[in-house]
Image (cartoon, rainbow, N blue to C red):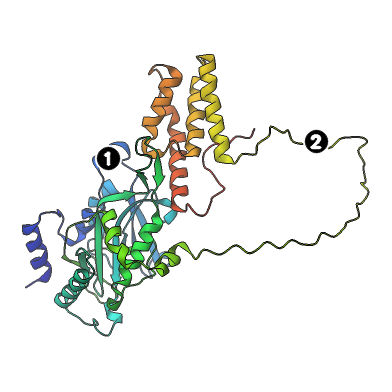
Amino acid sequence: MNLHTYYTAQFQKARPLTNFFENIYEPLNYHVQSERELKDFPKFAKIAICLKGEQYKNGFLQNTYEVQDLEKSLELYRDAENCYITSNQFSFGRSEKRLCNLVMLSCDLDTYKTEKYKGTTHEILINDVKDVCHLNNLPYPTIMYSGNGYYLKWIFKEKQPVFQLSKKNRKGKYRTPLNVQKWKIAQRVINKLFEDFGSDTKALDVARLLRLCGTINGKTGKRAELLEVHENQSFDYMLQVLEPHTEQEDLDKVLGIKKEPKPRVLKEIQPTIKKAMALPVANEPKQEPSKNFIAKNTRTLAKARYEDLLKLIAIREDVTGERMNFTFWICNFMGITGRINFVEFQEQAEKIGQKVFKDKNWRFTDLSTLENRVRQYNLETSINAIKHNDYIPLYTPKN
């Protein structure tokens, strides 16, 4: 009996949770868009499909596709050889800097490198994987044969955007960056549980590739196929079940070991001889900063600026002739501080516009360039919250 037909047909009959069982369409089970995404950001989420081979320049060819066009794009790769697809979604290309949605946790099992599972059958592999899941209180994953090894996929019920609503600020509708490091820690822990199967605990790259189901493995000549499908799980639930298996080493590998600050040693100050100036300035006193001067960083300065603009509107009662400028700069400075983000940009910008214009006689399209810059700023700062990036794609005029 064909194992693929047996497993998928049985599952489809018992739990019709998956719509696409033909191998080449397997990515359509998780690379999807919600109704809101299709309405507000139809061309935002993208995936990359890559081909490897000597016939390509540098041995690699990558194409980017919008998620909404994925079904017809997959047809181009039906009988492709050494073809791979991203397991997460990006705003463009394939890099951590451009990550927009987390889709799954996964294990790449190189069973052919292990003594126990080298040359194993699908039935044995699936049963042993389920035993490990049962012992460690893990939900069963979707299982795919790669033509040589296997993939285990714990697909999320809902994609995890880079930005998600924080419980602390839910009433105020502020958004905080999703900590991608949580995903990396979970990815490391779940791969550690399947090390006996040949999994890689270093597979922490959100931009990593998995072989496209239905394509041919060039090493073995075998076709990658979907073996068994199971219910999707929420990201929070997966973090919860993996927490008991998380050790300090896992945190250190992702977050880095916190270094203790070195004790400060005061150096002995050596007397110096002042050199005479070549061009002395006669009787000019040294300028001292004002006592009222308070140094501000970029974000605190931006906060002070939009507060000043709002106060100025209240004092003048109206800013005729400069309404669009006021709206633009208030949105820009609020974007720098994080009070406005790209997910709710239009909704929040319209509130500011109504406050400035005092009616709906204004065009949101005038802020389209600013909206794109806010999106870029949010994505770049959310990926690496620990390492501060001095470059800000928003507008930071000098005083």
Q: Disc number at residue 275?
A: none
Q: Earlier in the sequence, mark 2 or mark 1?
A: 1
Q: Residue at x 14, y 59 (%)?
A: 21
Residue situated in front as seen by the camera: 378 or 167 = 167
Query: Can the viewer see residue 83 in this picture?
Result: no
Residue at the bottom extreme of this rendering: 115
Residue type beneath disc 1: Leu
Q: Secondary structure at mark 1?
A: helix
Residue 231 spot, x, y in % from top left = 17, 58
Is residue 399 shown left or right of residue 163? right
Q: Which image quadrant is residue 11 in?
A: bottom left
Residue 62 spot, x, y in % from top left = 37, 59
Q: Secondary structure at mark 2?
A: loop
Pointer 2: residues within 10 angstroms few (<14), some, or many (20+)? few
Residue 126 spot, x, y in % from top left = 17, 72
Q: Residue at x 51, y 34 (%)?
A: 333
Quadrant showing the N terminus: bottom left
In the image, residue 153 sits, relative to residue 274, either above or below, namely: below
Quadrant showing the C terminus: top right
Is residue 277 shown left or right of residue 5? right
Q: Residue at x 56, y 38 (%)?
A: 300
Residue 91 spot, x, y in % from top left = 38, 48
Is residue 280 shown left or right of residue 161? right
Q: Which residue is mark 1?
A: 38
Q: Which residue is mark 2?
A: 287
Query: Can the viewer see residue 48 in this picture?
Result: yes
